């Protein structure tokens, strides 16, 4: 409605700006959880300018995906571009902020305009590589994250990537769904790819005949090495400690049990066993951001449920309450970056649904209810979650903004599984 | 090999018979219709070769048949209920036959791989598959099979027999697979 109004205004004004359908691949039909009111978020417009259309397009889409703004759609690169910003026009459109991107010697200069006040609120030059360079898109995403910081005080999460599994191979993809790149060799069967906190390497289970070591792969060189202590047996569900020094994982043993271990991956030493299951399986460890607690899955109540322990294996306790015999299996926990919650999935009528547990109060919030929704993973802002859903008919990764309930699909080919969201990549301050 | 030596023996025996000429005697009168002794001898020789070959073939077929049967019994899948790792009663006879074969062939070792349908959690299914493999391993050891003959592994939901999404496919995919890893040729039949 809002959008139609804007379109009408634009056409009436016969301005050089042309209203358009939202060309960036966001499907308006997927805004299922309209729990926000249009107008409660600041309205932002990407100001037109000469050249740099792809930069403006990426930044505009990132700002839309940040879910912090209502991004007003304008045709990039209008026919007449003046150096002065027509604040009056954008005020008429209802815009609160305008982002201006202009070329300069080293790259671009980005200005945040306060439309209401008619002033420039922030201005900063950014070095960006040529559009053909592999790091171009990440550099632009970092501009977006900085713009979010200017307005909200905390950076966005555009300069991040997701690891996903498609047909037994790991791929990485930018947070906006672009630039999908294979990470592991085509011939290998792998599972559970997970980022190191610095984003420079990934760990995953590599299936061999009869064993499954955990591999640590350097993303820059592509070289991989077996993690010490995972040479025998099947070793699964790796997770890094927040300082990146320790890798926790689960190992299946020859007696049918599965238990959690931790190993120092810097010195490739010092394997420690953290759980002693005997008659229960323990797996899927996830560190709290302070590194002192680990949430994990244990079958000690008969069905898999979410437990927690100290990172040395002591002080084990039930984390997510359940009703014996009534509550479905609960799996795939991931501790939020702010430490306040643990996301996981729990079977409701045999279909997994994504839940968030508030660690302090032990209260739940069920985020999904239609289709099968599983394997949630947090964005670094602790606000967005990616998860797997078959709601579109295919198993795909979706991203939900837990504040507004807005969701969007990361459209990829094939059946997508086990996403893991990186921390902020490449030097954006936290 | 065995059938070949039998054939050679049969051929030699036939040749020896053929080499012996009967003594010539004056034909009694009235002479009956002449007997073509050469043809009879050739026929006898051929019959003896055929019989030996048939016996050899039958023996080889029986031996091969037995190997096929033992191998089929050894590798026959067992199946599980959803999210369960209990051995079902209908699979007990199957496991008993495997136990007998393993005991009759101490050099034989097998790997049991536990598998799951794709409805459970991907990662939890690896633990569940391992428990399914261990359930069969425990059953076999309880029947007296040496623990060293069995190793277990889990493939979770990663190696479905039938990748379809249907009750029938899921039921097929919740299984233990049994693969010989050593000493799987020329198995001895259990007594």
Image: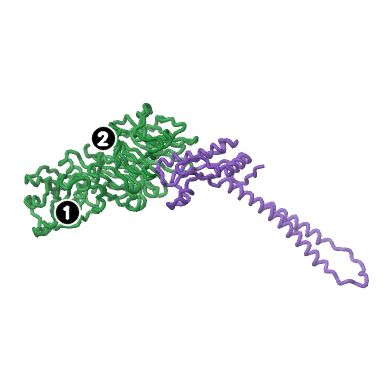
Find residue A80 and report its horizontal and vertical position in percent: 10, 58
Q: Crowdedness of circle 1 by 10 Å Cα count: few (<14), some, many (20+)?
A: few
- Report how far apart the C-alphas of labels 2 and 1 lie in the structure: 36 Å
Find residue B40 and report its horizontal and vertical position in percent: 80, 65
Which chain letter matches label 1? A
Sooner in the amino-acid sequence: mark 2 or mark 1: 1
The foreground one among A100 and A184 is: A100
Which chain corresponds to the colour green? A
Chain B: colour as depicted:
purple
The foreground one among A334 and B48 is: A334
The foreground one among B124 and B80 is: B80
Q: Eyeballing the image, is A64 above or below A249?
A: below
Q: Quadrant of the N terminus of chain A?
A: bottom left
Looking at the rendered structure, which numbered label has been put on residue A338?
A: 2
Image check: A397 left or right of B34?
A: left
Q: Quadrant of the C terminus of chain A?
A: top left
What residue did someone put label 1 on? Answer: A1
Tag 1 secondary structure: loop
Find residue A58 and report its horizontal and vertical position in percent: 21, 50
């Amino acid at each position: 409605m809002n959008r139609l109004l804007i379109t009408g205004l634009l056409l009436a004004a016969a301005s050089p700006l042309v209203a358009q359908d939202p060309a960036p691949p966001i499907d308006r039909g997927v805004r299922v959880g309209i729990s926000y009111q249009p107008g409660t978020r600041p309205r932002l417009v990407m100001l037109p300018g000469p050249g740099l259309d792809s930069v403006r397009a990426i930044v505009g889409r990132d700002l839309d995906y940040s879910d912090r703004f209502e991004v007003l759609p304008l045709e990039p690169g209008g026919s007449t571009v003046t150096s002065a910003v027509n604040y009056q026009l954008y005020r008429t459109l209802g815009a609160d902020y305008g982002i201006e991107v202009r070329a300069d010697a080293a790259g671009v200069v980005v200005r945040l305009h306060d439309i209401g006040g008619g002033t420039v609120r922030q201005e900063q030059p950014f070095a960006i590589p040529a559009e053909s360079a592999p790091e171009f898109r990440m550099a632009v995403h970092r501009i977006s994250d900085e713009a979010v910081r200017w307005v909200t005080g905390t950076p966005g999460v555009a300069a991040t990537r997701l690891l996903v599994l498609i047909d037994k191979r790991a791929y990485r993809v930018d947070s906006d769904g672009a630039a999908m790149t294979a990470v592991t060799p085509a011939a290998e069967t792998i599972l559970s790819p997970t980022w190191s906190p610095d984003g420079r390497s990934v760990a995953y289970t590599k299936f061999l005949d009869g064993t499954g070591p955990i591999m640590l792969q350097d993303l820059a060189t592509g070289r991989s090495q077996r993690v010490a202590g995972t040479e025998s047996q099947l070793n699964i569900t790796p997770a890094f400690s927040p300082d990146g020094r320790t890798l926790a994982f689960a190992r299946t043993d020859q007696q049918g049990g599965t238990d959690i271990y931790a190993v120092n991956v810097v010195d490739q030493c010092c394997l420690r066993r953290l759980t002693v299951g005997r008659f229960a399986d323990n797996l899927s460890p996830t560190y709290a951001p302070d590194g002192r607690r680990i949430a994990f899955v244990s079958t000690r109540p008969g069905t898999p449920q979410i437990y927690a322990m100290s990172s040395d294996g002591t002080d084990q306790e039930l984390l997510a309450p359940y009703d014996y015999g009534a509550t479905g299996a609960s799996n795939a926990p991931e501790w939020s970056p702010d430490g306040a919650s643990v996301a996981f999935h729990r079977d409701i009528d045999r279909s997994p649904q994504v839940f968030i547990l508030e660690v302090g109060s032990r209260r739940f919030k069920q985020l999904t209810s239609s289709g099968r929704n599983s394997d949630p993973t947090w964005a670094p802002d602790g606000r967005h979650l990616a998860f797997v859903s078959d709601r579109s008919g295919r198993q795909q990764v979706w991203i939900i903004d837990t504040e507004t309930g807005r969701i969007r699909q990361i459209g990829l080919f094939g059946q997508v599984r086990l996403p893991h969201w990186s921390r902020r990549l490449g030097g954006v301050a936290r | 090999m065995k059938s070949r030596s039998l054939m050679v023996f049969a051929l030699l025996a036939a040749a020896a018979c053929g080499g012996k000429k009967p003594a010539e005697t004056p034909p009694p009168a009235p002479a009956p219709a002449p007997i073509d002794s050469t043809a009879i001898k050739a026929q006898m020789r051929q019959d003896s070769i055929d019989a030996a070959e048939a016996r050899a073939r039958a023996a080889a077929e029986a031996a091969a048949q037995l190997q096929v049967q033992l191998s089929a019994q050894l590798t026959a899948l067992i199946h599980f209920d959803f999210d369960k790792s209990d051995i079902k009663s209908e699979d007990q006879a199957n496991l008993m036959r495997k136990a007998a074969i393993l005991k009759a062939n101490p050099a034989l070792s097998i790997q049991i791989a536990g598998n799951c349908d794709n409805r459970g959690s991907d990662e939890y299914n690896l633990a569940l598959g391992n428990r399914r493999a261990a359930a069969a391993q425990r059953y076999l050891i309880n029947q007296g099979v040496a623990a060293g003959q069995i190793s277990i592994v889990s493939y979770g939901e990663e190696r479905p027999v039938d990748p379809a999404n249907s009750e029938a496919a899921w039921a097929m995919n919740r299984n233990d697979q049994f693969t010989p890893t050593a000493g799987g040729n020329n198995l001895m039949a259990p007594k």
